[in-house]
Image (cartoon, rainbow, N blue to C red):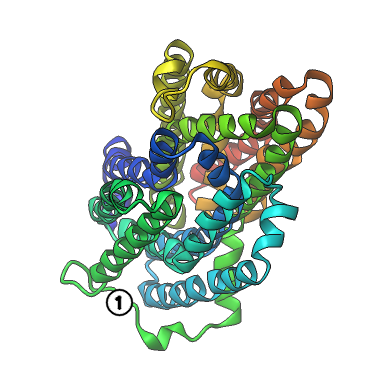
Amino acid sequence: MEKLGRERIGKLLFDYSMPAVIGMLVNTVYNIVDRIYIGQGVDPLGIAGITIVMPLMMVFMSASMLIGIGANALFSIRLGEGRRDDVEKIMGHAFALLFLVPGLVILFCFIFLDTLIVRVLGASEVVFPYAKTYLRIILYGGIFSAMGPGINHFIRSDGHPKTSMLTQIIGALLNIILDPIFIFVLDLGIAGAAWATIISQFISFVFVIAYFNSRFTVLRFRLREMKLGLRLSLRIMAIGFAPATMSLAMGLVNIILNRSLSRYGGDLAVTTMGIVGSIIMLIFMPLQGINQGVQPIIGFNYGAKQYHRVREAYWLAVKTGTIIFTAGFILLEALPYLFISIFTHEGGDLMGMCIRGLRICTAALPLIGFQMITSNYFQSVGKPVQGTILGMSRQLLIFIPLLLILPGFFGLDGVFLTMPVSDVLSVIVSIPFMRHELKFLHNANASGT
């Protein structure tokens, strides 16, 4: 781990981010491969069913982020401070919390399943059977969908980013293999897609746990460290609160978004956003990988008070993210049909709506890298308040009011316009926060404190 304080920042960012980028891209398969197979071989309305239940699936993602990212940030900071005795205690707390929190969420969802799908998520009569079938099965493996990614963060910060990537790849490739078998060969339809997903997530979880019982690390998940202490548990969740809140906010946004889509465009519009959202996810995941890769670099050097390296890592991540999003923007604007045809072979109204929606939703894509890296920075240095504010500004404080206002003036186009307008405004909000932080880093570095 000492190389985080000595190795050249560019090399560190590449070594830590590239496996994370690949892992995140592959992990995205969990969310979109079902839509591809269902859209191509079952029914495009099945995509609407998965899109409708996605907010609840994001709750599991939020639980994973709340504990996994929060504990991992604290893990990296403690290593930078040289406090190695605290590391396994942090890991033990994370394991117990990753079991407890998602478990409570799953119990709640099973009790109120129909009510959640119809009244909260807003599924139509046509989409409801697809949504219920898929979600009920996904809930069976909900704990593993949270624990696998949550624990995986520790592998990367333990100095094995490639191993972290491989555990994600194993599960995703298995999902790709099982999907056509369960959907077409066994003729299980959308239920087959769900079973393929949870089986793959469980296998990925098994490989993650196997790492911490291998010769590649001296760290272990020890039963004695899984006795939860209130102070450490709250500290972990405080640091992870920002990314978890962003994920929860996105779930809330998706609920309101799906209802707006249904109101102004019907089930066809919900299907459209399912396809458009999946394409956008492919562009976003590399930046999430960069965020994961730069987090231990920033956290370690911040803990070691090497603030010049913190600044260098932050700016390099911003530049890299901006380049990726700009390239993605150019590709999507130039070749929208190519990306959309991955999910459906249908033309007509669905294709036309998808192309228009994709072009509008991604209009401000080149600007988002700065905002996402900045929000992640504050989480990495253990400043959850600033990270939460910036995360909520884009996903909640700005997006939802716009989503309630713009469609009243522009109809379905107003729903699509909400994304680029909120992206621009959230960047404006982020600038003074980071300007103040960069000034602090400069002064702290100059004074040697």
Disc 1 marks which residue?
A: 220
Relative to 346, does residue 314 appear above or below in the rendering?
Answer: below
- Quadrant occupied by the N terminus: bottom left
Q: Which of 438 and 28 lies nearest the eye of the viewer?
A: 28
Relative to 200, does residue 147 appear above or below in the rendering?
Answer: below
Is residue 7 rendered to the left or right of residue 395? Answer: left
Q: Residue at x 58, y 32 (%)?
A: 273
Q: Residue at x 37, y 47 (%)?
A: 27
Residue 392 in view (yes/no): no
Q: Which of 248 and 391 lies nearest the eye of the viewer?
A: 248
Q: Single out the residue that lies furthest toward the front.
A: 187
Is residue 340 rendered to the left or right of residue 397? Answer: left
Q: Single out the residue that lies furthest toward the top.
A: 334
Q: Which of 208 and 307 lies nearest the eye of the viewer?
A: 208
Q: At which x and y percent is residue 179?
A: 33, 48
Q: Which of 258 and 382 lies nearest the eye of the viewer?
A: 258
Residue 12 in view (yes/no): yes
Relative to 422, does residue 185 appear above or below in the rendering?
Answer: below
Q: Quadrant of residue 428?
A: top right
- Residue count near mark 1 (Cα–Cα under 10 Å), binned few <14, some 14–19, many ≥20: some
Q: Secondary structure at mark 1?
A: loop
Total numbered labels: 1
Q: Quadrant of residue 300?
A: bottom left
Q: At which x and y percent is residue 276?
A: 53, 29
Q: Residue at x 60, y 37 (%)?
A: 439
Q: At which x and y percent is residue 10?
A: 31, 35
Q: At which x and y percent is residue 88?
A: 37, 76
Q: Residue at x 48, y 49 (%)?
A: 448
Is residue 226 rendered to the left or right of residue 58? Answer: left
Mark 1: which amino acid? Arg
Q: Single out the residue that lies furthest toward the left.
A: 215
